[in-house]
Amino acid sequence: MLKFVHAHIPNCIVNSATATYFKARACLNNGFRGHHSNQATVNLKPMKIQILPALTDNYMYLITDETTKESAVVDPVEPDTVLQAVSAEGSRLTKILTTHHHWDHAGGNEQLVKKYPGPLQIIGGDQRIGALNTLVKDGDSFNIGNIKVDCIYTPCHTTGHICYYLSTPNQVPAVFTGDTLFVAGCGRFFEGTPEQMYTALVEKLSRLPDDTRVFCGHEYTVQNLKFAQTVDSNNPQVHRKFEWAVDKRSKGEPTIPSSIGEEKATNPFMRVTLPEIQTQAGCNSPIAAMQTIRKQKDNFTG
């Protein structure tokens, strides 16, 4: 049903309905807490990443090069939260990195452009992204201060999805994966195919350095690991990470970031080349396993 909606209804109507849905859901679920998780900071000096919860389960990220005090924000669906973080950081916001056009990721772009006093470069891989002024493709690169950003084209969830790989010399890198790669999961195939998700996860993202920190678009970790236990039941790392995630969420803490190495060890969608995953799926190829377990996850209630 969701796939049909995204394919056949005009984007403006989908975005309007989506905005109303997410705002109402966030008010209902978060109540007086305001947000689903506590804010947190990850220091990969000179790269500083502030995890900013939004809506019911989204994450935005403020990235700052501490040597130049230049910042960029990933998927700023709640502009006021972003502006407060920029002010507290005392940095200069120059870029919006948009992973894809869905409202809960790109829906704050126009308002942030209006509210921020300086010029902003709005970067993304899809003309449907609000306020877009810099269209990027696979292999493009740019900088946030001294931080290098490489664009990784990962179509499937949407046709224009981009992941952003950030690196500085001799330091731990980071990748912002939107709705392509989640902790222990992957995005729905709204506009793409199992082959495309296989390319994105196995042929592209899994080849990044194992210590690359993974910052995804949603807090789905506990439910993803519940599912992973059903398709990779003999994997002790999955069971351990599930217990860890439940503990983190009981404290209101994000389960972000993960790492590429952790995902290769615990995420069934990155493990579809393994016989145990294919056997569970009743398949003998990684593409067929990708398709099968994604359908199983679509119907999984935990």
Image (cartoon, grey):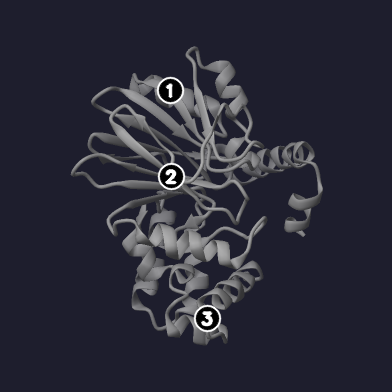
Q: Residues within 10 Å of mark 1 (few under 14, many from 20)?
A: some
Task: Say which residue appears at 61% left-offset and 46% top-offset.
Answer: 29
The amino acid sitting under disc 3 is Ser
Identify residue for label 2. 139
As measured in the structure, the alpha-carbon distance from the residue carrying label 2 to the one carrying label 3 is: 28 Å
Among numbered discs 1 and 3, the one appearing first in the sequence: 1
**Element type at marker 2?**
loop
- Most extreme residue toward the top, as rendered? 117
Residue nearest the observer in this picture, 239 or 27 = 239
**Image: 183 above or below 59:** below
Identify residue for label 3. 285
Identify residue for label 1. 94
The amino acid sitting under disc 2 is Gly
Task: Say which residue appears at 54% left-offset and 27% top-offset.
Answer: 79
- How many marks overall? 3
**Element type at marker 1?**
strand
Residue 269 in percent (x, y) is at 49, 68
Task: Say which residue appears at 50% left-offset and 12% top-offset.
Answer: 117
Q: Is residue 132 left or right of residue 276?
A: right
- Most extreme residue toward the left, as rendered? 170
As measured in the structure, the alpha-carbon distance from the residue carrying label 1 to the one carrying label 3 is: 44 Å
Quarter of the image that includes the N terminus: bottom right
Residue 145 in percent (x, y) is at 31, 27
Q: Of discs 2 and 3, which sits in the foreground?
A: 2
Q: Is residue 6 left or right of residue 52?
A: right
Residue 97 in percent (x, y) is at 48, 35
Q: Is residue 93 left or right of residue 21?
A: left
